[in-house]
Amino acid sequence: MAVRKIPKNHLFVTGGYSSRKSEVMDAFESLLEKDYLLLLDFDDTVESFEVQPVRIPVPRVPRGYVPDVLVKYRPHPETGEIRKPLLAEVKRSDYLEKHAAKYAPKFAAATAYAQEMGWEFRPVDEKEIRLSRLQNIKFLREYRNVSSSEKDCNRVVQVLAVLATSTSSERVLAELAPTDDERLHWLPVIWSMVQRRQLHTDLDTPFGADVSLWLPVEQQ
């Protein structure tokens, strides 16, 4: 549970983010932080995350320091190794540079605290968050409420299984939808399946007119 309540702020966008990886509605206090939570929510290596997780004592700072997010990871599927949890401060790089003196003692305290807990601490800025992956995930989220029939989903899987282990959205559509009207039916089915991980794609490559698709390993 968050140790600090995020107040409304006329300078920054605040709000709540609901995730299957968190037991509560997570509050965010900037759009960058919201984007980071979205990345974590869609990252299969992340087991869970918690916003405003701990209050760390800092000399001469009466209320101490509360980092933004604690991220916990799943075991590696092949080695079983588990990455250290990440305690992160989510801020723009120019803001951190401008307020470096203010954050220096807080970051030092957080680094020491994280080491004691067996965690890692570091800032996370827009250079790590606002990449092609984020834009692709935002696109896919538009299809999160699409309800595709089991019959349609099975048909897509069958087509991919026949074409190859890795193919493209246009090749799949060519098999499923010979007309424009049929494309309008099948496109939401395909994207909703990608959003639910029933189909896989390369999230780090910007989506274009044709996107690579493949079946999860267990279905190949």
Image (cartoon, grey):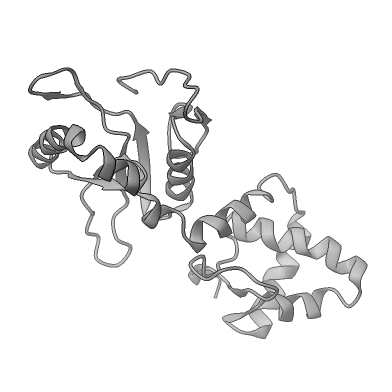
- Residue at the spot 51% in from the left edge and 65% down from the top edge: 203
Q: Quadrant of residue 70?
A: top left
Q: Residue at x 30, y 20 (%)?
A: 3
| Residue farthest along the bottom direction in this orientation | 163
In the image, residue 186 lies at what x, y percent? 80, 64
Residue lying at 11% horizontally and 25% vertically, measured from the top left: 58
Whether residue 45 is situated above or below residue 70 in the rendered picture: below
Residue at 60% from the left image edge and 73% from the top image edge: 213
- Which of the 4 image quarters holds residue 179? bottom right
- In the image, residue 122 sits, relative to residue 174, either above or below, namely above
Question: Does residue 61 lie above or below 129 as drawn?
Answer: above
Residue 132: where, in percent of width, then height? Answer: 51, 63
Considering the image in quadrants, where does the N terminus appear?
top left
In the rendered image, residue 117, in percent from the top left (x then y), is placed at 12, 37
Q: Is residue 157 left or right of residue 108?
A: right
Residue 92 placed where, x, y %? 37, 45
Task: Please tell me which residue lies in front, 144 or 65.
Answer: 65
Is residue 110 found left or right of 212 in the rendered image?
left
Q: Nearer the viewer, residue 70 or 28?
A: 28
